[in-house]
Amino acid sequence: MSVPKKNRELKAMLRRAGFFQVAGGKGSHTKWRHPNLSRTLTLSGQDGVDARRYQEEDVENAIGDSRTGGAK
């Protein structure tokens, strides 16, 4: 079992992959877009909180999709 990433780490990964934050998140939710993808990715939680495994998987999948130019 690996140590969970913090939400701030997931956001940094998205920025490095070319994602940008868009308006529209409520509370601790943030929405992210990539120029090569038609969908948005929503992350929830404060920056210092451990990310849930499904959030890490969503970020990894979105980054992979942005490289290939398509969504699953």
Image: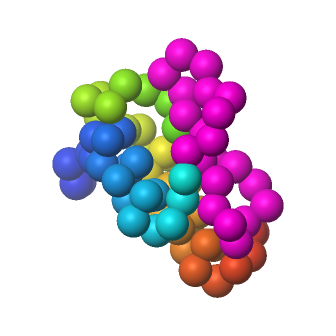
Residue shown at 63%/62% (left/top)?
34
- Residue 6, quarter of picture: top left
Q: Quadrant of the C terminus?
A: bottom right
Give the number of marks: 0
**Above or below 34: residue 28:** above
Q: Which residue sits furthest top? A: 27
Specify whether 26 is left or right of 12.
right
Task: State the image coordinates of residue 67 (x, y, percent, origin top left).
Answer: 58, 80
Q: Main secondary structure of the magenta part?
A: loop
User: Does the image show residue 42?
Assistant: no
Place of residue 70 in the rendered image (x, y in percent of width and height, measured from the top left): 74, 76
x 70%, y 49%: residue: 40
Spot occupied by residue 49 in the image (x, y as percentages of width and height): 29, 29
Residue 26 as seen in the image, left or right of residue 36:
left
Q: Is residue 14 visible?
A: yes
Whether 27 is drawn above or below 69: the answer is above
* Drawn side of residue 67 relative to residue 50, left or right: right
Q: Does 68 appear above or below 63?
A: below
Asked if residue 14 lies in the magenta stretch, the reply is no
At 50% from the left and 46% from the top, the residue drawn is 54
> Farthest residue in the right direction?
38
Type of colouring:
rainbow
Residue 39 lies in what quarter of the image? Answer: bottom right
Q: Residue at x 37, y 25 (%)?
A: 46
Q: What segment carries the magenta color?
A: 21-41
